[in-house]
Image (cartoon, helix red, strand yellow):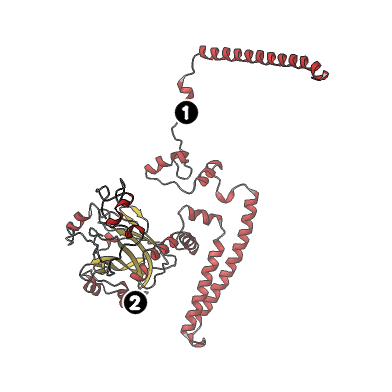
Amino acid sequence: MSPCRAVARPLIRKFQQQCTLRHFTAGAVRAAQVDEQQQQQQQQPPPPATQTEPTSEPAAADLDPNTVMPEFEAQLIKAGIMPIGSRRRRVAMRTTDSIPFEQLPYQAFQEARKILAADREDKLAKIRSELDKIARLERKDPADIKGGQPIKDIRLAGLRKEVTRLKILADVNDPLVKKRFEDGLGDMNKPIYRYYAEKKWRSYDNRLITQRIKQFNIVPDVLPKLETTADVQLYFRQLKIPPGQIVDSAISENPPRLRVQVFDKGERLVTVVVIDADVPDVANDGFTKRCHFLAANVPLSPVVTSIPLSRIKADDQLAVPWLPAFSQKGAPYHRLGIYLLEQKPGEKLDVALMRRLYSKRDGVSLKSLRDKFGLTPFGFNMFRSVWDENTAAVMTRQHAPGANVELRRTRIYSLKPPVKARGWEAKRQGPKYRHLWKYTKRIRGLSNARGWTKRR
């Protein structure tokens, strides 16, 4: 050991002892102080329970649909009142002391509103100019226009379409219009709200319907072509049914309700058809179609969106009443499609003729119906039906045959000759190779010689 290390070792030991003793003493003092504080807290009487319990009674703002907080939403919905707008909007309304939306005291917000107002004035000036052109063109005699009345109608339609586009551009950036649409207070007679509704529908629901049409082969099994332009929602007993969902027979026994939102102005007459595309045809070893509901001359507009099938009872509307959906035991699921077809403008269909043609329900062709009455498909939804515990009772109440019949697939035997066994084991199955059977036939748990495994 070097002389330096021999001299330094006693000093290091002394410093370590001092540090250790100092640390231990300080820890003991702190522990004693903590024990004294705990004893004092135990000796003090506990505070009354009324001071610590928080109040859970909702205030007036908590039960207001415009300012309700998330923890009171269930209580408000149970009372039959739905919250208005998003949670972020309701929190903002609670913290701004009911200041109108357009008067929020934010400088950037107000400056942006000035820019949007100037742009809106520019669009309104263009709208006035287009309306003047329409008025001048309407006053013109068709004989003075090259092409006559057809060209005049085409030019008027183009000008009116441009006016609609300018109206949308004038309000598309208005935060008040956007807020009113998100709150569900938009007037569908105005093109801007129809534009917002169509944009929202095409973002998801239209894609879902298009996917279901392709997934379940609606095209070409029912129609050669189908492009939806309206939002069709299906409800059974106030329960919204997603497209393609399997519905219990007891629920689908009652007629459904349709909510149809169109995105172009004006009232029109539509035909509603419900067709089952998977009815088993045992005699021909295939499938046929069956009509479950048929009604014509049903009014529809952007503001009149509800079509309850149970309330369509007039003689000039109802052709075939509602037949509950059912599927026989052993059959695959049935695809029941709800098709909406638009009639020609101002034309009513002959419902008595429809009743004579399709009252038998079986063998209905939607393509033939479309061509015969000049209809245009524009809306679609669907649900599925399978055999369940309620199907037999539903079929009995509707006097539908086949409730006691179970369908089974016919086994098709192969026409190929049996193939001889091949391989090492197949060549050594004779008595000559009896000494090898212990490796191939009498393996416990795997061999079939003593019945340990089942034949298939």
Depth check: give the residue in front, 33 or 232.
Answer: 33
**Residue that badge 1 annotates:** 54
Picture layout, residue 293 above or below residue 27: below
Picture layout, residue 78 above or below residue 310: above
Depth check: give the residue in front, 137 or 279.
Answer: 279
**Residue that badge 2 annotates:** 374
Picture layout, residue 361 above or below residue 449: below
Secondary structure of residue under mark 2: loop
Which image quadrant: the C terminus? Answer: bottom left
Expressed as whole percent of the image width and height from the top left, the position of residue 218 reads 36, 67
Expressed as whole percent of the image width and height from the top left, the position of residue 181 reads 48, 56
Residue type at the position of mark 2: Gly
Picture layout, residue 347 above or below residue 42: below
Q: Residues within 10 Å of mark 1 (few under 14, many from 20)?
A: few
Expressed as whole percent of the image width and height from the top left, the position of residue 259 reads 36, 59
Expressed as whole percent of the image width and height from the top left, the position of residue 90 reads 50, 45
Q: Which of the labelled discs sits on residue 307, or is there none?
A: none
Question: Disc 1 versus disc 2: distance between alpha carbons?
Answer: 69 Å
Would you say 123 lies left or right of 73 here?
right
Q: Residue at x 55, y 73 (%)?
A: 130
Secondary structure of residue under mark 1: loop
Would you say 203 lies left or right of 256 here?
right
Which image quadrant: the N terminus? Answer: top right
Residue type at the position of mark 1: Pro
Q: Residue at x 20, y 55 (%)?
A: 392
Q: Residue at x 49, y 14 (%)?
A: 45
Would you say 99 lies left or right of 435 here?
right
> In this view of the protein, can residue 302 be seen by the observer?
no
Q: Earlier in the sequence, mark 1 or mark 2?
A: 1
Q: Are marks 1 and 2 in contact (CB under 8 Å)?
A: no
